[in-house]
Image (cartoon, helix red, strand yellow):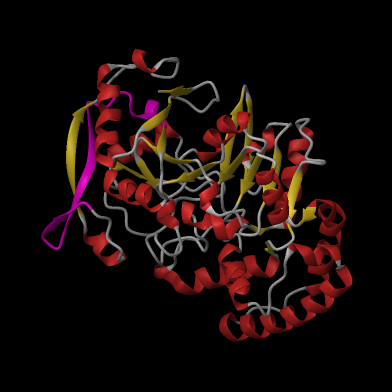
Amino acid sequence: MNTCVVGLQWGDEGKGKVVDILAENADIVVRYAGGANAGHTVIIGDTKFALHLMPSGSVREKTACVIANGVVVDPGTLIDEINGLKEKNISMTGRLFISENAHMVLDYHKLEDQLREASLGKNKIGTTARGIGPCYADKIGRSYALRMADLRDIDTLKDKLETIVAYKDKLFGALYDAEPIDIDAIYTKCCEHSKVLSPFICNTTQFLHEAIDADKNILFEGAQGALLDLDHGTFPFVTSSNASALGLGAGCGVPTKYLQRAVGVVKAYTTRVGAGPFPSEQDNEIGQLIREKGNEFGTTTGRPRRCGWFDAVAVSYTARLGGITEIAMMHLDTLAGMDELNICKAYKVNGKETTFFPGDAADLDAAECIYETLPGWSEDLTKIENYDDLPENTKNYVDALEKIIGVPISIVGVGPKRSQAIFR
């Protein structure tokens, strides 16, 4: 069975844990979008793995891992992750496959990210400053882009770098009065990256097509969340790739007709990092309580996440957008101890009630939530292993969400560990 796992909110839903669990039955795990701006956390026993580029299935030693063409790769970050796994006795030798067509994030992309955000002042987007947007922009622009394949021909790469850096120096100097880029330092890093990563670089599309022909089980892992999708999210407060399930085909060369299962991951509430509209946000004691209990601080940036009630309007939209067949809901344990829980079941926009997610950020910014209120529960869920043993109010909350969204909730998370996932 081929499965896609994708976030249905603004990222940070707990995809890493879900991918790790489902990877037990996968031959291959594929990361198909995003870059080191993603942060996927996997906890095994007392060991915590914070992954940014490596597929979450990498912690399972018999699973092949693919970083596909839709990903923008920061070579230094990737090497750090490979070494970090090696320190924990997990080797990627012979089982990591990096697309030759994946584009490279280099230091001048990060610099451009920082300079651009600073110039926007109060209108900044709230990027992670990891160079992701500028790298994707170079990819679209074509003329000043470098791909992982270039690490296999380091002499030609130097010629390309000279052209690119000359252009970037003119651009950054004119727009931001920036100092010249140190091309020698970047080239030296590329030479070092080439020695480590070249053995892993290959045609991953061919690898995946051959795996399909061989009836391998493939698990496709999204990054960020569908509400951050470049085309279908809360533009311009989005990421620079198709972070929904719609990005899968272009991101790795495998059409969705080969999928049998699409799992959407949500939290039992809603969070987002950075600027942008957030109708159900609770910028108050409730939001602070959720943040503290859920440890809502970014895996990649450490920034505190904005927190609010579950937005079923948004999730209904992203579930349909991605053809989601089932939902995994994480952080259910975080809500314990609240007297009442609210679910946003509709919006009021310009005086009119709607259950469809607005396509315009201004309309979403003006949206008022219409809530359904349910009683909460006080019981600790973290040691419960069977769904029937959950408190009645907890099950009622899950049932209410399932009814509004219209997609079955097949997994609920009651803690961060592998063992703290309950299958219905």
For the N terminus, which image quadrant?
top right
Q: Residue at x 39, y 37 (%)?
A: 267
**Where, by quadrant of the figure, is residue 345 drawn?**
top left
Q: Residue at x 30, y 63 (%)?
A: 359
Q: Is residue 221 visible?
A: yes
Q: Is residue 222 visible?
A: no
Magenta stretch bounds: 330-355
Q: Position of residue 206 (x, y in %)?
A: 72, 55
Q: Position of residue 169 (x, y in %)?
A: 69, 82
Q: Residue at x 68, y 70 (%)?
A: 108
**Where, by quadrant of the figure, is residue 37 drawn?**
bottom right
Decide which of 256, 137 is in the foreground and name it.
256
Decide which of 378, 25 is in the foreground and name it.
25
Residue 372 on the magenta segment = no
Report how many numbered discs are placed on residues in the image. Answer: 0
Query: In the displayed structure, does residue 112 sit left or right of residue 14?
Result: right
Decide which of 98, 79 is in the foreground and name it.
98
Q: In the displayed orientation, state which residue is furthest to the front.
A: 213
Query: In the displayed structure, does residue 141 sit left or right of residue 14?
Result: right
Residue 334 on the magenta segment = yes
Q: Is residue 122 above or below residue 322?
A: below
For the C terminus, which image quadrant?
top left
**Where, by quadrant of the figure, is residue 111 drawn?**
bottom right
Q: Is residue 69 above or below residue 113?
A: above
Query: In the displayed structure, does residue 421 sit left or right of residue 130?
Result: left
Q: Position of residue 190 (x, y in %)?
A: 81, 63
Q: Residue at x 74, y 61 (%)?
A: 100
Q: Position of residue 235 (x, y in %)?
A: 39, 65
Decide which of 76, 27 is in the foreground and name it.
27
Q: In the displayed orientation, state which residue is furthest to the top.
A: 389
